[in-house]
Amino acid sequence: MTELTTQKEATLAAIADAHTLDALEELRVAALGKKGWVSLALKTLGAMPPEERQQAAPTIQAIRAEVTDALTARKDALEVAELEAQLASERLDLTLPAPEAARGSVHPVSQVMDELAEIFADMGFAVATGPEIEDDWHNFTALNMDESHPARAMHDTFYFPDKDSEGRAMLLRTHTSPVQIRSMVAQGAPIRIIAPGRVYRSDSDATHTPMFHQVEGLVIDRDIHLGHLKWTLETFLKAFFERDDIVLRLRPSYFPFTEPSVEVDVGFEVVDGRRVLGGDGDAPGHGWMELLGSGMVNRRVIEFAGLDPDEWQGFAFGVGVDRLAMLKYGMDDLRAFFDGDVRWLNHYGFSHLDQPTLSAGVGARA
Ligand code: DAH
């Protein structure tokens, strides 16, 4: 018995001294494993005479319990220590400056769209969207361009081979004007929206890319007239170009979806060989630049969209967003917009901190 007690003391001391889970496991096998000294001691009980066994059994059981408890306690302690060591080694100091990494920038087109939303929100316009994959009813027919209309041919449309479930030809929208129809159908009148987005035409040269951006404007209400259109465009362009001397010239024009239609020119001045918007286009050293299409919404379009044209009138306009960006920020090659060249983006891109606001200037650079 004293021999067992000595062995127990030695094992308990070794357990207390074990510093790894592996060392602990070795001690467990040596004591409690099949051939461990505790197991062997238990086996001797069978051969003992009953009185002796009655005395020895509780002692050996107690030793086994004591060793088992010591192993469990030490194992728990070692596991906690291991976890703490791991946590300490994987600690991340979030207050440290992040390593220098390449920084993305906001594309001028996105920046200009944000500027437009900011300016028009101030005039009570909401932002509307529509699908880029359109059907020919929304893109053409409801805009007063039936199948035989020559304007359809002018749009260089990308068609899909299959028609939709209602038998309508599917296409990539050639302009943002179908959002006019979708907005009227979905929300009725009155309406005040702008609809910025991508449009597609099979056209490609220095000033045309197969995908480009437009923003559509639509106001539908009672007693709307051309004066409202002119004021809205003037207010928008002054805020956008951040100049009070923006002068507009309205020229009669033709679009199937507006009647009357007006083409809007903006006065510019030639400074160091560059056209800078502002001033009366008729003044010496000045000229007029065609900027956007607009007009009073055609009665037929209002009817197509399910509204009564005797009750509701409105105006609409459409303008190229890429063009606006080029004019405002001095870029001269449209194709570079869509090349994804990091050097171009670093130069012309905006920081995410350049948030357009009317008070700080929509084109503010941080
Ligand atoms: N949708 C025309 C285009 O893509 C632009 C346009 C002209 C839109 C006159 C209008 C408008 O809303 O009234 O060329």
Image (cartoon, helix red, strand yellow):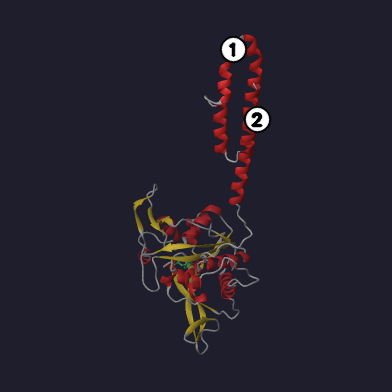
> Quick one: which residue is furthest to the bottom in this view?
284
Q: Residue shown at 66%/14% (left/top)?
A: 55
Asked if residue 41 is positioned above or below residue 106 in the image, the reply reads above
Above or below 116: residue 7: above
Q: Is residue 270 left or right of residue 118?
A: left
User: Residue 337 appears in which quarter of the rendering?
Assistant: bottom left
The vertical placement of 290 against 115, above or below, is below
Residue at the disc numbered 2: 9
Q: Is residue 176 visible?
A: no
User: Which amino acid, by three-letter code, is at mark 1?
Assistant: Met
* 118 or 255, nearer to the observer: 118
- The amino acid type found where label 2 is placed reads Glu
Residue 83 in sight = yes
Which residue in the protein does label 1 denote?
A: 48
Please name whichever residue, 50 or 131, is drawn nearer the observer in this view of the structure: 50
- Counting residues from the start of the chain, the first of labels 2 and 1 encountered is 2
